[in-house]
Image (cartoon, rainbow, N blue to C red):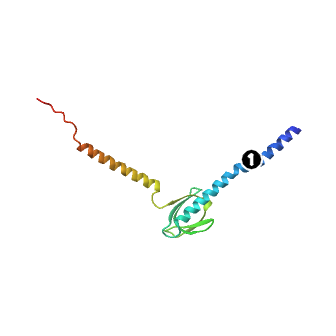
Amino acid sequence: MSRRGLSFLVMVSLLQLFIMPIFAAPQNDEEARHVAKIRADVARRGVGDKATVRIKLRNKTELKGYISHAEEDSFTITDAKSKRTTTIAYRDVAEVRGKGLSKGAKIAIAVGVGLVVAAVVVGIALANVSGPRIGLSR
């Protein structure tokens, strides 16, 4: 191998050493933010029979039950029917959902009901308004 080829190879290797950590860091930061978000969501819901959740894991598995115990790196979900407990690491969780409809769904339903009520009121008002009467005179 010539000196030119060797120097090029050394230059590319050094560049790779300095550039690769720049591209790898955002993924670690994003992962840390995701874990913090899941941890905060579990903490907000609390622990006990009233803290019913549906957990969707990163491997597409879904678990239902209530949060029975929360720790620094993991939490425990208990199936309400079988009383079987499963310990889940925060990093393995894709999504935490509570019981019932989401906030966005509730807002959409309220807006839809409001629009229907407004349409009915406008329809009734237009039906009761008497417009100009054009009569045929003989």
Q: Is residue 29 left or right of residue 49?
A: right
- Taking the spot 33% from the left edge, 48% from the top edge, the residue there is 118
Where disc 1 sits, the SS reads helix
Is residue 8 visible from the viewing direction of this image? yes
Vertical placement of residue 10 versus 79, above or below:
above
The residue at 73%/48% (across/down) is: 20
Residue 8 x, y percent position in the rendering? 83, 40
Relative to 110, residue 135 above or below: above
Give the x, y percent position of residue 58: 59, 56
Q: Is residue 1 visible?
A: no
> What residue is shown with label 1?
19
Q: Closest to the observer: 84 or 118? A: 118
- Residue at (48% x, 68% y) in the render: 50
Residue 36, by quadrant, is bottom right
Q: Nearer the viewer, residue 87 or 29?
A: 29
Which residue shows up at 50% across the image and 66% down it?
51
- Amino acid on which disc 1 is placed: Ile
